[in-house]
Image (cartoon, rainbow, N blue to C red):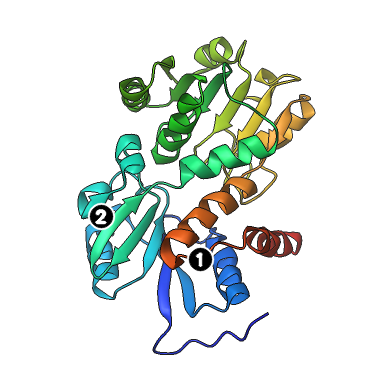
Amino acid sequence: MKNYLITGKTKLSGIIGNPIEHTLSPIMHNAAFRELGLDYVYLAFRVEAAALKAAVNGLRAVNLTGFNVTIPHKVEIIPLLDEMAPLAEKIGAVNTVVNTNGNLSGYNTDAGGFLRALLARDVVPEGKKVVILGAGGAARAISFALAERGAHLVIVNRSLDRAQACAVKIREHFEAAAQALSLNETNLKKALGDADIVVNTTSLGMSPAAGETPMPGELMRPGMVVFDIVYNPVETRFLSDARKAGARVIDGLDMLVEQGALAFELWTGEKSPAKIMKQSLVEVLDKK
């Protein structure tokens, strides 16, 4: 491991969101910087919705190299940026920002990170029916990645308007079917009856509210693939219920690492040490 000394030359990066105390992103990014001997440091910043504009202007002013964006700012940050990468613009959500001499560019690495994590488990989305729980920024990115690979989507959310907006966004760019439903037990039973994959894109089940879940466990079944993008805790109640039902489970760590690796490369221009990034997370989580 390289020496890691913060000086006046150290480049700053980080993550904004609310809540933010749970985030493991500083652990994996700082491990990656140390591994490659890069003079960077990554910090977490809690930013409330009302302070988003002031925070983004502040990060621009202090010349952060770049930063990640998490719940609840992935959509709301867009008007505050100077430009958008084509993929992020199509999705309508940003999770990574690059600062080039005060010019803020928005990217979405959630889509690629999710797809990499799915394919690494030999789950191919073509022709599959996928139920997406939630309709926020992460849901948009994941839906986009799945639709691009030929999946049929059902987006289920407490706010039907948001689910419909997400479905419309998908249909604007793809021929894949995209249906929207409001979140209730009747609609869940209907959607999950013949679903191949179900993905939780909400924050339900995230520490410190680890006992929460977006759907009843009895609606899961053997053979179904259940993916939870929540990574803290790694074993959420949602995944625990899925295991008991005999479903295949994928936790949020792989997606976290893959999307983080893509962001790392945007900021540094270096190939990310993804294995080191994941190892750093596993070591920390094993101690909890």
At 53% across and 66% down in the image, what residue appears?
A: 26
Residue density around tag 1, few if under 14, some if 14–19, many if 20 or more, within 10 Å = few
- The residue to which callout 2 is attached is 50
The span from disc 1 to disc 2 (Cα, nearest Å) is 35 Å
Which three-letter amino acid code belongs to the residue tagged 1? Glu
Residue 170's label in the rendered image is none
Tell me where residue 65 appears, x and y as whole percent: 36, 69
In the visual, does 278 lie left or right of 47? Answer: right
Q: Is residue 144 above or below residue 187?
A: below
Tally the numbered discs: 2
In the visual, does 11 lie left or right of 103? Answer: right
Q: Secondary structure at mark 1?
A: loop
- Dividing the picture into quadrants, the one containing residue 127 is top right
- The residue to which callout 1 is attached is 270
At 52% across and 50% down in the image, what residue appears?
A: 259
Q: Is residue 91 above or below residue 77?
A: above
Residue density around tag 2, few if under 14, some if 14–19, many if 20 or more, within 10 Å = few
